[in-house]
Structure formats: C-alpha cells, structure tokens
Amino acid sequence: MGGKKGFGRIARFFKAVYLKLFRINDTPQKIAIGFGLGVFSGVMPGTGPIAALFLALIFRVNRASALLGSILVNTWLSIPLFFLSVKTGSLITGLNYRDICNGWAAFLKEFHWIKLLQLSMYEVILPIISGYLIVSICIGVLAYAVTLAIVSHKLNK
C-alpha cells in the first residue's frame, strides 16, 4: 500500500511542476532557457537557486522557470550525477576513474581546507569539475529542449 502512496506523491509533484511552468507569463523560449539554466545550476555542485536566479538575470530569461529548474534537480540527482561526472571527467582527462573516486573518498575522510591547495588534489578535483561541467551542460540543454517542445506545444493548442 505504501508504494501507491509514494507514487501518488511523485505524480502530484510532477503535475504541480508542469502546471507551474504553464502559468508563467512569458515566451516559450525564455521559459525554456530559464529552465535549462536552472537545471544546469542545480546539477553543478556549489551552485543552485541563487546561481539560477543570477544566470536568469544575466541572460534576461524567466527567473521563475530558472528557480524551478534548479530546485527540481538540486539534491535528488546528486549521487548518480557524481559518479557520471567522475566517469566523464576521467575520460576527458585520461585519468583512472577508480583513482579519482579513491582520491575523493580520502579527501572527504580527512578533509582540511589546506588540502585543496595541494598539487595532488588537482588530479582529483580537475576531473570532477570538468565532468560536472560537461554533464551539467548536457542535462541543461536537454532540459531546455524538452521544456521548449512541451511549452510550445501546449501554448499552440
């Protein structure tokens, strides 16, 4: 019985997100770009809703859809996207995926701010950041395209 309740909550959540996108009074292009920028900033670690609003202001797109996109992906995708980003970063830099994961685990276990300045940490941090950047851009562009198609289709009806 708990499975049906959980599914109902998830379905209501996505319906609310869907309805909020269509209540935004702006062009489909500005809504979609805002949403894509929000998803991009929600995926990138260390950024989020504030960065989404800042990017929306800079690009003069819809701030509400940017905020919605950021909040939608900010936390619940963190763990799977971390591994995807590390894998992507390891492919870009040519470093070993397992070495990067082990280096990150050791860094978190014995965290000290001074370790960020050590040259050996760049072999861990650089692949992760570059991986996140590529993954964030790809997911943001995908979110933009899907949102543009849905909003344009809905408004043309």
Image (cartoon, grey):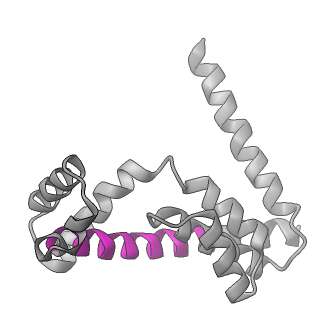
Q: Residue furthest top?
A: 1
| Residue 75, horizontal then vertical, whole percent | 51, 50
Residue 34 in sight from this viewpoint: yes
Instruction: Pick the residue in front: 98 or 108.
Output: 108
| Residue 38, horizontal then vertical, whole percent | 62, 68
Question: Which residue is found at the position 77% from the left and 76% from the top?
Answer: 62
Q: Is residue 7 left or right of residue 29?
A: left
Q: Main secondary structure of the magenta part?
A: helix
Note whether 14 is above or below 88 in the view shown: above
Screen quadrant of the N terminus:
top right
Note whether 104 is above or below 135 in the view shown: above
Instruction: Pick the residue in front: 101 or 12.
Output: 101
Screen quadrant of the C terminus:
bottom right
Question: Which residue is found at the position 59% from the left and 15% from the top?
Answer: 2
Note whether 27 is above or below 97 in the view shown: below
| Residue 147, horizontal then vertical, whole percent | 68, 68
Examine the image and state in which quarter residue 152 appears. bottom right
Question: Which residue is found at the position 70% from the left and 64% from the top?
Answer: 67
Instruction: Pick the residue in front: 140 or 120.
Output: 120
Question: Which residue is found at the position 37% from the left and 69% from the top?
Answer: 132
Q: Is residue 13 left or right of residue 43?
A: right
Residue 113 is covered by the magenta coloring: no
Residue 138 is covered by the magenta coloring: yes
Q: Which residues are magenta?
A: 123-145
Instruction: Pick the residue in front: 94 or 111.
Output: 111
